[in-house]
Structures are given as structure tokens and as C-alpha cells.
Image (spheres, rainbow, N blue to C red):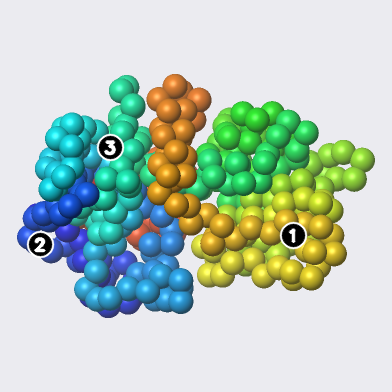
Amino acid sequence: MLAVQVAEFGGPEVLVPVELPDPVAGPDEVVIDVAYVDTIFVESQIRSGWGREFFPVTFPYVPGGGVAGIVSSVGPGVPSGWLGRRVTAFVTGGYAERAVARVPALTPVPDGLDLRTAAALVHDGVTAAGLIELTGVGPTDRVLVLGASGGMGTLLVQLAHARDARVVAVARGPEKLSLVQELGADAAVDATRPDWPSAARTALGGDTPSADVVLDGVGGTLGAAAFPLTADGGRFSAHGAPTGGFTPVDPAEAARRAITLLGIADLQFPDPDRTRLASTALTEAAAGRLRPVIAEAFPLGRAADAHTAIEGRELVGKVVLKV
């Protein structure tokens, strides 16, 4: 089968198409004929050598943690009813024509939802739905979303809007600002403005303009500038690091202001929660209430081009691979 392999840390060019043996399902496993592969920014960071303390790898490795496709074979003890089913799944080595998945990692794709859309929700749908749940976003909340035009940011805007929160989205450039407002943001702030924190505070409104919930999918200096916008007693989630590092927050300062801090570790959901959240995201998408924004679908053999586009950050929305 065709797969994409990484033999050393480096730029997108280290993503090399190779031929590998077809996988075989073991007990409690299935083989999926992959239609689309989900991609997330952190995969490009891992490929470059960042985050080894969080994401250790052994060379050579096939990247990719999420796929959508059709179950083509099942392992010993797995009910035959899974055969032929359209599913999404969390996997190891998803940049391939076929992937093995554990049965607890499978989520059936609802009728009427295409596999391309389903793939775009494997990671971001679960994380976004989990974040909205963990932070308890509700109708009285003012929510600030950083990186709002990205794959997960666009979902967070929609989910927070659906809960009747006031949503202020931070993105870069007119096209991205227009998109997040189309998706339900009450206001959009351009992160390229030197005074964007002041503009965001004004957009948040209220007697003491601040955010009850800050969803930081960016990290670095942008996230650090957003933390002071968090209301006392609010919730701050530092779950993204495309800038090269998670937002550094002083726990003592957060405790003094009674701010609840969430990080990437809080989003490592056990199988039952992950499956439930995935099912929620897929169901909402099938009903037309949640729309992942897909910028481009690159052929599997052009995974290097996909990573180049991801790192360039010029595309609006997310990237998937088409098998």
C-alpha cells in the first residue's frame, strides 16, 4: 500500500511516499480503507522535531492520527457488523491507504455526511466539543477565540455561538475575519493590529469588558496578551502552540484571580468520552449545524505540499489528505 513516511526530523521534504505491506487486524481491531486523512498543525511540529517531551517518535514513522474511510476487514473476535461501515477513527500511522484501528476508537459516520467532512472533524471536532463542555460555555458568557479561522477555531466559534454566548474571534486579515463572522462571531478582531487586545476588550463589551472564557489555540505572545483579558473567575484554555510554545501563564496569578486554567493534558480524553464527543460533532455536522472549513484536500502522495501549506498559514480553514 502507499504510505507517507518520515525517516528524520526536518522540513516538509522529509515526508516521503513509500510502499509498505498492507496491515492486518489483530484482536479488537479493524482495517480501514482510508478515504481521507485528518491533518493538524502539531503533526508538522512533530515532524520538525518540536515537542519531543510530549510526542516521542521512533524513526521511521508514518504520521497521522485520524482517518475516515470504510472498514474492510476485522480481527479475531470483532463483530462482522463492522464490515463495510463508514467510520472515523483515531489511529497510529494514518498517512496511508489502509490503517488499523482499535474498535473503541471507531465512530460510525451518519448517513448523509460525506467522508471528507467527517475526516476534518476527527481531531478538531472532538477537541472543540470537549473544550466547550469543559469550560461550560453558556448564554451569559463572553468568549474570546484565538486562532479563530483555523480548523478548530472555526468550530469553536460555531459551538460557542450555538450556546448563545457572545463570541469575539481573533484572526488575521480581511478574508479570515469575514469567515469567522459568517460562522457566528459577534465581532472579529485583526491580530495584526498592534492594539488588538484593546480592540478585543472593547468588542467583549459589558461594564467591565473582559472574557469569561478564553480559548487560546495559538500560544506564544498572542496568548500571553490575551490572558489579561480573562475575567476574574473566568476560564483560560492554553491548548494550542502553533507559534512554537503554549502560552506561559503564572499559576499564582491565575489562582489570585480565581481563573481556571486548562491545557493540552486536559484534552486527552479516554475512549468513551472521545467516542461520545466525536459522535456529537459528526451528528451536528450531518444536521447542518456544524461546518468544518476545509481549505484544500491534497493527494496522499503530496503530503509534503500539504505540510508546506499548513505551515504557511495562508489557507483559510484546514487541510486534509485525499487517498
229 vs 279: above or below? below
194 vs 151: above or below? below
**Residue linked to disc 3:** 87
**Residue linked to disc 2:** 20
Q: Residue at x 44, y 22 (%)?
A: 287
Task: Give whichever of 310, 97 is nearer the camera.
Answer: 97
Q: Quadrant of the N terminus?
A: bottom left
Q: Residues within 10 Å of mark 3 (few under 14, many from 20)?
A: many
- Describe residue 199's horizontal placement relative to residue 105 as left or right: right
Amino acid carrying mark 1 in the image: Phe
Circles 2 and 1: CB atoms closer than 8 Å: no
- Describe residue 91's horizontal placement relative to residue 271 as left or right: left
The image position of residue 56, as x and y in percent, is: 37, 74
SS for callout 1:
helix
Amino acid carrying mark 3 in the image: Val
**Residue linked to disc 1:** 227
Q: Earlier in the sequence, mark 2 or mark 3?
A: 2
Task: Give the Cα separation between the discs numbered 1 and 3.
Answer: 38 Å
The image position of residue 189, as x and y in percent, is: 69, 45
Q: Residue at x 10, y 62 (%)?
A: 20
The image quarter containing residue 217 is: bottom right
- Describe residue 123's horizontal placement relative to residue 188 as left or right: left
SS for callout 2:
loop
Q: Residues within 10 Å of mark 2 (few under 14, many from 20)?
A: few
Task: Give the Cα separation between the discs numbered 2 and 1.
Answer: 46 Å
Q: Earlier in the sequence, mark 1 or mark 3?
A: 3
Task: Give whichever of 36, 222 is nearer the camera.
Answer: 36
Q: Residue at x 32, y 77 (%)?
A: 9
Whether residue 282 is visible to the viewer of this picture, yes or no, is yes
Amino acid carrying mark 2 in the image: Leu
Task: Give the Cα separation between the discs numbered 2 and 3.
Answer: 23 Å
Q: Residue at x 69, y 29 (%)?
A: 164
